[in-house]
Amino acid sequence: MTDEPAERQSAVLDEAHLGDIKGALGTIRQHDLGPRRGWAAKLLTLAAIVGPGLIVMVGDNDAGGVATYSQAGQNYGVTLLWVLLLLIPVLIVNQEMVVRLGAVTGVGHARLIEERFGRFWGWFSIGDLLVLDFLTIVTEFIGVDLALGHFGVSRFVSVPIACAALVAITASGSFRRWERFMLLFVAANFLVIPLAVLSHPHAGPVLRGLVVPGVKGGVSSTSMLLVIAIVGTTVAPWQLFFQQSNIVDKRITPRWINYERADTVLGSIVTVIGAGAMIVTCAFAFGGTHLAGRFTSAGGVAAGLGHVLGSVPGGLYAVVLLNASLIGAAAVTLGTSYAFGDFFGAKHSLHRSAKEAPGFYASFAALVAVAGGIVLIPHAPLGLITTTVQALAGVLLPSASVFLLLLCNDREVLGPWVNRPWLNAVAVLIIGSLIVLSMILVVTTIFPSIDVASLLVGLAGAFGLGLAAAGVIWAVRRGPAPPHPDRARRDTWRMPPLALLGRPPFSLGRAVAMWSIRGYLLVAVALLLVKSIELGVHGGH
């Protein structure tokens, strides 16, 4: 099956996902496959394609991201900037695999998991996505409350208005209109640049922080957890589901993969610039003051900036926080609604009106309304929810990463677009590192008194041994590499309808990976649940 061209076949589940690309900044006709000659033609094409990569990356600099970067700057100065540079290749490699999956298959991430790994894992992917995304959306509305609360606006006014605005933007029935709103949010992300300038930064310390790994005050359990939090808030499971489905909905096909790759790289760079500017702002604004090393919350940072720099920087920070909360809520909620529609076979496209896809838009509105409603409940454990989101994302990241890598090596799914060996090696290294960090986050959340340095050494050593063993096994068992197809054939190859795909072989390596994931998740989720109940009963003490 994978050796036959599939130009006339498609696995697309909603016919609205086929047709012209109608992006915020341009249109590409469905049958326009001609070469782009000259920079002008290429830039116009990129303008039409750009969107999913920028939105998913900047959307991950959400309320939780703003708080995490602010904490890094306020408590550790610019000494953690180097972490952001290391995250650029992590973001690009992870999301590039998602780009190929979306453009080649025309099917969302949750549906592919069900089809290739079985019903249990399909339901699991939907279940964990709902729980994690819902809690994440709650944290975004916490951000809305803190941001507008800085200006004296009651949460009983700000949160309902934000909910209504998000539903109105999404349910307009026009993909192009929705994407234009999202790109406005992306543009507003750059407000952090003048905010950083107002903090009067110095180039020397910033450059040292970028290129010289280190931690102010030395490595400790607290600083190590903050490093993990920076990674966790930048690489999240929801990103995989959102970008793959958004690419499908935008009607991007293999012909335009390189342009979408450029969109993703651009988004990664913009995200890291925004995160770095936030760290720089808090590092230089609070450095040498009584507020240095005393981070409390994003709301506290807004008030603190108003105190040390004046009302304009404090208000600008609140606007940045509000913007981050809104784009985060929009992307995470839409990613969840996409997954539901894809998994259950319902119509799920922003090209459709609310009348044409009632379930799709109803799920979006319900998620927004319930999440916003929780923020309005008096004495709701909002701090506990924020902590649980971070830990739960750490629990689920390994499974999402492993599924992603397995799908990108499935020739029935990607045909000539499967991972190259070198990319697999890089991806395994990155995913293994993320797994180690996520396990540290989970273990230290549940057992806060554990020695983090010893835990890191032990887990890193075990990962290194496992990686060496896997490399030996691969070298012994690998067969001849299949020939690379010509460019024209790759540009027109798409995954055949799901019903025509052969079932993937359940090899020893796949069995070990699946059972390892299952065991890890069962133990980690159970322990995390116990810890959450304990924190709820004892009020976080």
Image (tube, helix red, strand yellow):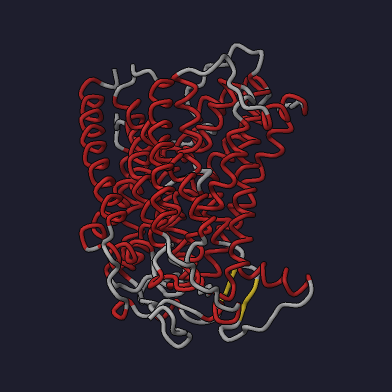
The image quadrant where one finds the N terminus is bottom left
At 51% from the left and 21% from the top, the residue drawn is 295
Instruction: Give x and y (percent) for residue 352.
Output: 42, 75
Query: Which of the 4 quarters of the picture holds residue 77?
Result: top right
At 22% from the left and 37% from the top, the residue drawn is 523
- Nearest the camera: 135 or 301? 135
Image height check: is 205 above or below 103? Answer: above
- Nearest the camera: 519 or 377? 519
Image height check: is 270 above or below 292? Answer: below
Image height check: is 193 above or below 218? Answer: below
Image height check: is 206 above or below 191? Answer: above
Residue 252 falls left or right of residue 407: right
The image quadrant where one finds the C terminus is top left
- Nearest the camera: 197 or 445? 445
- Nearest the camera: 501 or 373? 501
Instruction: Give x and y (percent) for residue 187.
Output: 64, 52
At 35% from the left and 62% from the top, the residue drawn is 339
Residue 339 shows in the view:
yes
Instruction: Give x and y (percent) for residue 402.
Output: 37, 51
Residue 190 falls left or right of residue 304: right
Outermost front residue: 476
Query: Which of the 4 quarters of the picture holds residue 206?
Result: top right
Instruction: Give x and y (percent) for residue 304.
Output: 58, 22
Residue 174 shows in the view:
no
